[in-house]
Image (cartoon, helix red, strand yellow):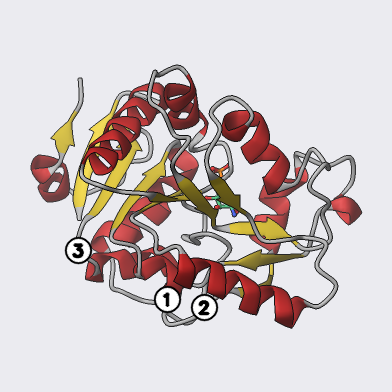
């Protein structure tokens, strides 16, 4: 795991964008993409660049069950707004929140991943260490699944909805097994509320109680965090990290 500590999320987003450019210059054709506030600055850097993504394919991590693509809380809507409407891709995949048959939808999405092997996966980090919507306890070999969201995630999402009853309780998520198949991974995390999860992910035991800790077992993982998210790391980890000033 390579750790990069930046002053803020703008610098981190720029750094992540540079890693995406490098991967594309080395032949990457499929980007695994994430939603949430964390990758927003990276998408801004992509949008403000002159890089052409029109031959690229994207495969998103997750979507809320029951959410229509034109609902402004859906992850499809988020991706259109922050990236695809401004920088067209050749093909973009997000799980279908309105799929009638959950089983068929998860199988379809696994086929999407099999047909479009991910060269570089971008990840955020849940406060409880989740990646995608793989909550604590998720098996490390899971493929795409319909997953119940934990109360901590529902609480974290509640700020986006008028009342808690409207907050989705289930999501379709790529499994950890699918995520680990991508050639490269960039995980970003910002803010003091992520510091505990960041510490567990980098320094703690590999355990599915903190799903992101599995990334310790994978080659070619770059973690980009701001100083607040890095605030609980040991001196030894911080000494080895790259610091972007
Ligand atoms: N499914 C998403 C994750 O992919 C994301 O990483 C996490 C963190 O969100 P934020 O980036 O807003 O902190 O939130 C959601 O749970």
Which residue occupies 36% across, 69% down? Answer: 180
Residue 213 visible to the viewer? yes
Q: Is residue 179 left or right of residue 171?
A: left
In percent of the image, x 67 and y 48: which residue is there?
156
For residue 238, which numbered disc appears in the image? none
Q: Earlier in the sequence, mark 1 or mark 2?
A: 2
Does residue 61 appear to the left or right of 96 in the view shown?
A: left
Q: Residues within 10 Å of mark 3 (few under 14, many from 20)?
A: few
At 90% from the left and 55% from the top, the residue drawn is: 165
- Percent position of residue 78, x then y: 67, 38
**Residue 231 visible in this rendered orientation of the protein:** no
Label placed on residue 143? 2
CA gap, disc 3 and disc 1: 14 Å
Q: Residues within 10 Å of mark 2 (few under 14, many from 20)?
A: some
* Residue 219 screen position, x and y as percent: 19, 63
Counting from the top left corner in percent of width and height, residue 83 is at 57, 32
Give 180 or 149, whichever is nearer the viewer.
180
Determine whether label 1 and label 2 are within 8 Å by CB: yes
Q: Relative to 109, is 6 above or below?
A: above
How many residues crowd mark 1 within 10 Å: few (<14), some (14–19), many (20+)? some
Q: Quadrant of the N terminus?
A: bottom left
N-terminal of the two: label 3 or label 1?
Answer: 1
Q: CA distance from mark 3 to mark 2?
A: 20 Å
Q: Quadrant of residue 151?
A: bottom right
Horizontal relation, residue 49 to residue 147: left or right = left
Percent position of residue 205, x then y? 28, 72
In the rendered image of this protein, does residue 40 appear above or below residue 182? above
Label 2 CB less than 8 angstroms from ligand 1? no
Task: Report the residue marked by disc 1.
Answer: 177
Q: Secondary structure at mark 1?
A: helix
The circle on residue 219 is 3
């Amino acid at each position: 795991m390579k750790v990069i500590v930046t002053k803020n999320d703008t610098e981190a987003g720029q750094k992540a964008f540079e890693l995406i450019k490098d991967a594309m210059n080395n032949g990457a054709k499929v980007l695994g993409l994430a939603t949430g506030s964390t990758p927003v600055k990276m998408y801004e850097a992509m949008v403000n660049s002159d890089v052409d993504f029109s031959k690229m394919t994207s495969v998103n991590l997750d979507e809320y069950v029951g959410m229509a693509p034109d609902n402004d809380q859906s992850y499809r809507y988020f991706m259109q707004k922050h990236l695809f409407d401004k920088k067209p891709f050749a093909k973009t995949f997000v799980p279908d929140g309105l799929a009638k048959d959950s089983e068929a939808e998860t199988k379809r999405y696994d086929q999407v991943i099999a047909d479009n092997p991910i060269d570089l996966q971008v990840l955020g980090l849940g406060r409880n260490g989740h990646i995608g919507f793989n909550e604590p306890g998720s098996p490390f070999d899971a493929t795409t699944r319909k997953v119940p969201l934990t109360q901590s995630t529902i609480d974290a999402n509640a700020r986006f909805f008028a009342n808690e009853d409207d907050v989705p309780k289930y999501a379709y998520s790529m499994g950890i097994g699918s995520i680990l198949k991508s050639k490269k991974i960039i995980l970003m995390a910002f803010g003091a509320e992520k510091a505990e999860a960041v510490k567990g992910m980098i320094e703690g035991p590999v355990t599915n109680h903190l799903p992101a800790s599995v990334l310790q077992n994978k080659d070619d993982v770059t973690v980009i965090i701001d100083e607040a998210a890095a605030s609980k790391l040991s001196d030894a980890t911080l000494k080895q990290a790259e610091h972007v000033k």
